[in-house]
Amino acid sequence: MPVDLLDLNRIPRHIACVMDGNGRWAQTRGLPRTEGHRAGEHSLFEVVDASLEIGVEWLTVFAFSTENWRRPRDEVRFLINFNEEILVRRRDELNERGVRIRFVGRRDWRVPKRLIRRMDEASGLTAKNRTLTFTIAFNYGGRAEIVDAVRRIAASGVAPEKITETTIARNLYDPEMPDPDLVIRTSGEYRISNFLLWELAYSELVFTDTPWPEFQRREFFAAIREFQDRDRRFGGVDGGD
Ligand code: FPP
C-alpha cells in the first residue's frame, strides 16, 4: 500500500500498536523466540519512520505488559535488556529527528533501576521535541493504570461526587496523551490484552494477520487506509452536531 493512496488530510493524530507475533514468527522459522523480538525492532522503526513521513503526532507501542513477567525468566531478561539496548542505541537518532520519547507504565514495581535510569535519560534528552511523541508502554497494564489513577484520586481526598471522567483522565500515566484514533494489533489475535483500556473507548481497531516482524511501512499504510475508510461517529449519528 503506497503512501499516495492515503488521504494526507486525515492522518490519525494518535496511533497505538500491539506488536504481537514476534515469538511465533521466530518459532515457525526454527529460531528462538528472542530472534522474533530482534526482528521486531526493524518493524518498529519502519513504523516510526513512516509516522514521521506522514505527520502522525503521537505513536504508542506496547513493549512490555504487566502480564509479561509470567514469561520464562530468560525471555523476560532478554526483553528488559533489549528495551534498554534499543533506548541507548536509538535515542540520539530519535532526538535528532524531533521525536519526544515518553513512557507509560508502573515504574515502581519490578522494573530494574538501571532501566528506569535509561528511560529517564531518553525522555529527558528528547523532552523539548514536538514532531512526534513516541510513547513506550513498559510494565504497562490498562487495569493497573486505572487502579493507579483511582489510588491517586482517593489519596487527594476529593469528594466522590466531584469525580468525573476528566478527573480520571487527568490522573492517568500521561494526562497529555490524546486518546488513540487508531489501534493496530498484528498477528491475527483479536484482543485488546489490557492495552490502554480507558483511552481506547472510541478508537478504531484494525487487526491484521501479518506478524509484527513482517509489519512494514506498506502494512502500516494499509492499516491507516482502513481507518480512513471507516466512519467515526463517537456515539452520534451521521450529519449530527
Ligand atoms: C509480542 O510478541 C511482543 C513483545 C512482548 C515485545 C516486543 C518488543 C519490541 C519489538 C522491542 C520494543 C522496544 C522499545 C524500546 C520500544 P510475542 O512474543 O507476544 O509474540 P507471540 O504472540 O508470537 O508469542
Image (cartoon, rainbow, N blue to C red):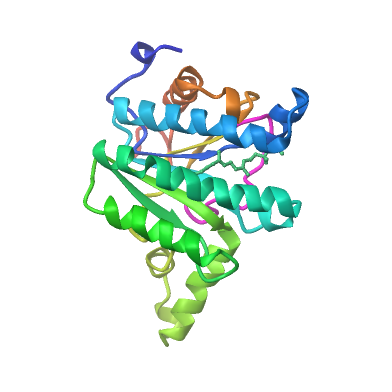
In this view, 188 is above or below 96: above
Q: Is residue 178 magenta?
A: no
In this view, 53 is above or below 110: above
Q: Which residues are magenta?
A: 186-202
Foreground residue among 162 and 56: 56
Magenta region's main secondary structure? loop
Foreground residue among 48 and 176: 48
| Total count of labels | 0
* Quarter of the image where the C terminus is located: top left
Q: Is residue 191 magenta?
A: yes
In-image side of 218 versus 166 (left or right): right
Whether residue 207 is visible here, answered yes or no, is no
Residue 214 rendering spot, x and y as whole percentages: 58, 22
In-image side of 140 versus 221 (left or right): right
Residue 232 rendering spot, x and y as whole percentages: 43, 35
Residue 143 rendering spot, x and y as whole percentages: 59, 62
Residue 77 rendering spot, x and y as whole percentages: 65, 53
In this view, 180 is above or below 217: below
Whether residue 208 is visible here, answered yes or no, is yes
In-image side of 49 versus 206 (left or right): left
> For residue 73, what is the image quadrant?
bottom right
Q: Residue at x 74, y 28 (%)?
A: 31
> Which image quadrant shows ligand 1?
top right
Foreground residue among 59 and 151: 59
Q: Residue at x 38, y 12 (%)?
A: 5
